[in-house]
Image: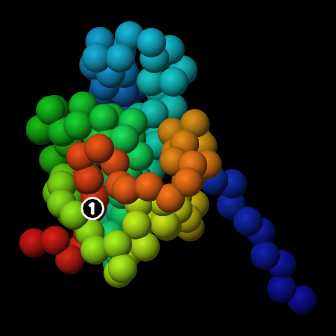
Amino acid sequence: MTVIQERPATDARTLIGATLRATLASNMQAKFPELSDDQAERGIGQMLAFLAAGAHSDTPLSPSPLVDDFWHAFLLHTQAYQDFCGQMLGKFVHHQPGFLDKAEHGGGKALRARTVDAIVAAGFVIDMEFWPELDLADCSQCHANCHNSPKHA
């Protein structure tokens, strides 16, 4: 008899230290004063989960607009971002805005659903508050059309 024990999903916030999390949360709350401390912390987790899943995906993934804002906040801390990518992801994850062919990738909602599925498959917690587009009708990608595509040079 084989016993399969599922691992509980990992909170991606644990991928960076408390000091960097506090800095990123503070940066986001300065830009978006309506974000509570809890929302800022959870948003950081969703951004880190997106990066970890995207670093090892064979297909393009796309953040929600809010997750993308958290990614932008992290990118501004270039050394910390570079260190995180190298140490935690094994490679640098570039932020590459661009347009993906809807026929090939299924449009924004399908791309976002694939992203959420990839995050779950990578073993991370999903917080649906940060992926609201999945409850909406089919639409285009985020306002900046950002994604992490392994096909992007």
Q: Is residue 14 above or below residue 105?
A: above
Q: Decide if residue 79 is in sight here.
A: yes
Pick whichever, 31 or 99, lies toward us: 99
Q: Amino acid at mark 1?
A: Asn
Residue in the picture at 45% in, 12% down: 34
Provide the residue designation for mark 1: 148
Q: Quadrant of residue 91?
A: bottom left
Task: Name the image quarter holding the N terminus.
Answer: bottom right
Residue at the extreme right of the image, as rendered: 1
Determine whether 12 is above or below 115 in the image.
above
**Seen in the image, is 123 located left or right of residue 88?**
right
Q: How many marks?
A: 1
Q: Residues within 10 Å of mark 1 (few under 14, many from 20)?
A: many
Residue 123 appears in the picture as rendered: no
Residue 120 image point, x, y percent: 57, 60
Outermost residue, bottom side: 1
The residue nearer to you, when weighing 14 against 142, is 142
- Seen at 51% across and 32% down, the residue is 42
Residue 49 in picture, x, y percent from top left: 44, 50
Say if 104 sits above or below 27 in the image.
below
Would you say 19 lies left or right of 3 here?
Answer: left
Give the structural element (helix, strand or loop) at label 1.
loop
In the shown orientation, is residue 78 left or right of residue 30? left
x and y percent of residue 132 in the render? 54, 42
Q: Which quadrant holds residue 57?
A: bottom left
